Image (cartoon, grey):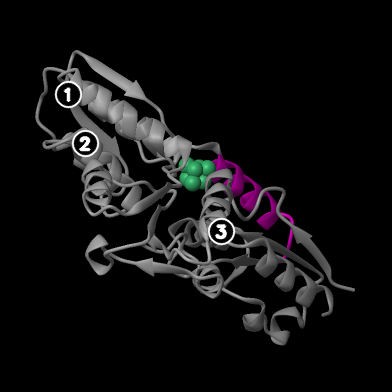
Amino acid sequence: MLEVRLAENLGFCYGVKRAIQLAEDSAEPDTRSYTLGPIIHNPQMVARLAEEGIGKIDTLDEISEGTVIVRSHGVGPHVYEKIERKGLGLVDATCPHVRKAQSAAKAFADDGCQVVIVGDRNHPEVQSILEWAGAGAVAVASEAEAEDLPLYGRLGIVSQTTFSGVKFKSIVNKLLDKSSDVRILRTICTATDQRQSAAVKLAGQVECMIVVGGRNSANTTKLAQLCAEKCKTYHIETAAEVCDEWFATIKKIGITAGASTPDWIIKEVYEKCQKK
Ligand code: SF4
């Protein structure tokens, strides 16, 4: 009999749950609502919201009326200004942890610091923090990038909320050489760490892991990479991808899911595995 185990922490984090709830609550019969970018990196959830009448736009230029839902990654100040200028409604689902990083970056900049965000500059959350920090703020994602920065009078450091705690510490160590006046706010959210630790722990106890979540979800992909270091791992988006042959020779399988994976998809995968 196959034993199917779920990771202790998996699936939606607080910020994503909140954003989806706010989006669903915004649906009204006579006003169209649109998320600015996909609400989360999960195509099935985006499709479900579309069925509930909540569309997706990539830029504010696509609409002239309706309500805009700002997703958990947040946006820069110019987006709020444009929403107001166009007379659009606003539902702000920026995760409070992201808001904290944005506010800290702005406060550092207002205080005359060079702002450095430790994170992936292409990630929408980091882009939103960069915009709050104003012109001149930079993002670094490696020790080498930190070393390449010049010396500064004052330095203010924040992190992408989903950045690795260990790597943040190592990059900050390099940044400490760049100024004698360094202020640091470690704005890393525990949801990512918890999901990663639980996934690694489970991957060490089973023969095979299934990681459920969007292929375009960075946090799900990271979970799959971590699990793959411990055991055979499959990254899937839905239960339809679960294959019989995976179960031919194993007795114990683990399941985890990224912070943007809906509960109903995790449940479908779990139930399908239990029938093997
Ligand atoms: S991972 Fe953390 S910071 Fe990001 S949306 Fe979830 S709770 Fe918020």
- Circles 2 and 3 in contact, beta carbons < 8 Å: no
Q: Residue at x 62, y 62 (%)?
A: 262
Residue range in magenta is 191-209
The quarter of the image holding the N terminus is bottom right
Which residue type does callout 1 highlight? Lys
| Residue bearing mark 3 | 24
Q: Residues within 10 Å of mark 1 (few under 14, many from 20)?
A: many
Can you tell which mark lies on residue 81?
A: none
Q: Secondary structure at mark 2?
A: helix
Q: Toward the viewer: 41 or 209? A: 41
Q: Toward the viewer: 132 or 236? A: 132
Q: Is residue 146 above or below residue 262?
A: above
Q: Which is in the foreground here, disc 2 or disc 3?
A: 3
Which residue type does callout 3 highlight? Glu
Residue 95 in view (yes/no): yes
Can you tell which mark lies on residue 146?
A: 2
Q: Is residue 117 above or below residue 6?
A: above
Specify whether 70 is left or right of 121.
Answer: right
Q: Is residue 59 above or below residue 76?
A: below
| Residue bearing mark 1 | 178
Q: Residue at x 11, y 22 (%)?
A: 152
- Circles 2 and 1 in contact, beta carbons < 8 Å: yes
Quadrant of residue 264 within the rendered picture? bottom right
Which residue type does callout 2 highlight? Ala
Q: Please tell me which of labels 2 and 3 falls first in the chain.
A: 3
CA distance for labels 2 and 1: 9 Å
Q: Residue at x 56, y 63 (%)?
A: 228
**Magenta portion: prevailing SS class:** helix
